[in-house]
Image: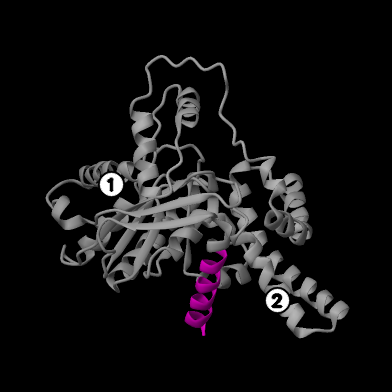
Amino acid sequence: MKNLFYHLLKQYIRVVLWFYFKRWQVRNIVPVPNGPVIFVANHQNAFLDAIILGCSSSRNPWFLTRANVFQNNLVKKIFNTLKMTPVYRFRDGFSTLRKNDEVIDNCVQLLSQGEAILIFGEGNHDEHWRLRPLQKGFARIAIAAEEKNNWTLGVKIVPIGIQYDSHSKFRSRVLVTFGEAILVKNIVKPNLSQPEQIEILLGITSETLKPLILHIEQPDYEKKQEYYLQNRIIESDLVEQLKADQEIVLNTPPIIVTNSGIKRSSDGIEKWFNPIFLYGFINHLLPRTIISWVLKTKVKDPQFIGSLKFALGMVLVPIFYVLQTSLCYALSGSWVISGIYLLSLPLSILLRD
């Protein structure tokens, strides 16, 4: 029953992702491997990153999730059903860090059973277009799994790059790139000390992950970002878009003078003359208003805006579809008209662009 619920939810979320994003593109540089795998991804968009990655592959990985959300027993059961397991951080209290030994043992057991684990290597989310230093957790798990199995398990680390056009805008675009797998036992030698083994894995994973995303170096990040946004040309294919964006960042002048500000889209007024956009806007006004109110009044961390916008829409929009279609039937008395109206609601999202 748990597996059925998980798979049904995954399929539903995939449908919602196709509506939420104007384009959701998945790129596999090589096929995603079977067997014990640790997916290591960059982290820019709170829990939306985990949702996207869980739906971008046929693998169903276990998610390492910050422990402070596992406070309630009911929540624990729900998260376990969704293949989420806690990981403890320094900010959760120094004493809780000891529990990470149990987390590592649990992950080792999962890998020994051929399961996949997803870890956000940077440790927390940050919406800047850059890769921050990777934390040691995934490397410790990979090494522990190989040591327990006498270096015969064949654990692979698969870097994943998530690249957003916008971190919070509805009907934006996102590219998910699965990189080439790193076979741990071919990279890390058993005779090295554990700190040396960890540093090797951190370095190689970081170097393979960085080309999969847009990485704007410090210092002067804000100026470089502004130059990038001013000179960006939109490509239809997101792989080509990433290459073009990386080329702009690579060729950023050492001295940047910007007086004009970031270029803004010119279609802000034109969209109101699009009848499909107007129809969709009017028919989604109620859930849109509720979502906007929640985001403005309840969200303190702006980096949660995209994730909560997606989650609230996933729940509220279908509810309003049912209510509005029921009202349509009450007024028309026709199942045909009501059915056409119901079908027009999601189509007005897909055809608005």
**Residue at (79, 59) in percent of width and height:** 286
Residue 226 drawn at (x, y percent): 50, 26
Q: How is the image coloured?
A: one colour
Residue behind mark 1: 205
Q: Few, some or many C-alpha atoms within 10 Å of disc 2 (few <14, some 14-19, many ≥20)?
A: few
Q: Few, some or many C-alpha atoms within 10 Å of disc 1 (few <14, some 14-19, many ≥20)?
A: many
**Residue at (45, 22) in percent of width and height:** 220
Residue 106, compared with residue 210, is above or below; it is below
Badge number at residue 340: 2
Q: Residue 282 appears in which quarter of the rendering?
A: bottom right
Q: Main secondary structure of the magenta part?
A: helix
**Residue at (76, 46) in percent of width and height:** 297
Residue 330 drawn at (x, y percent): 86, 80
176 falls in the magenta region? no
6 falls in the magenta region? yes
Residue 238, compared with residue 85, is above or below; it is above
The disc labelled 2 sits on which kind of residue? Ile
Nearer-N-terminus badge (2/1): 1
Circle 2 SS class = helix
Question: Whole-Å distance between the Cαs marked 2 and 1?
Answer: 50 Å
The disc labelled 1 sits on which kind of residue? Thr
- The range drawn in magenta is 1-16
Q: Let me know if residue 224 appears in the view.
A: yes
Q: Which of 58 and 73 is in front in this view?
A: 58
Cβ atoms under marks 2 and 1 closer than 8 Å: no
Q: Which residue lies furthest to the right in this view?
A: 331
Asked if residue 151 lies left or right of residue 228, the reply is: left
Instruction: Count the marks.
Output: 2
Circle 1 SS class = helix
Residue 72 drawn at (x, y percent): 63, 65
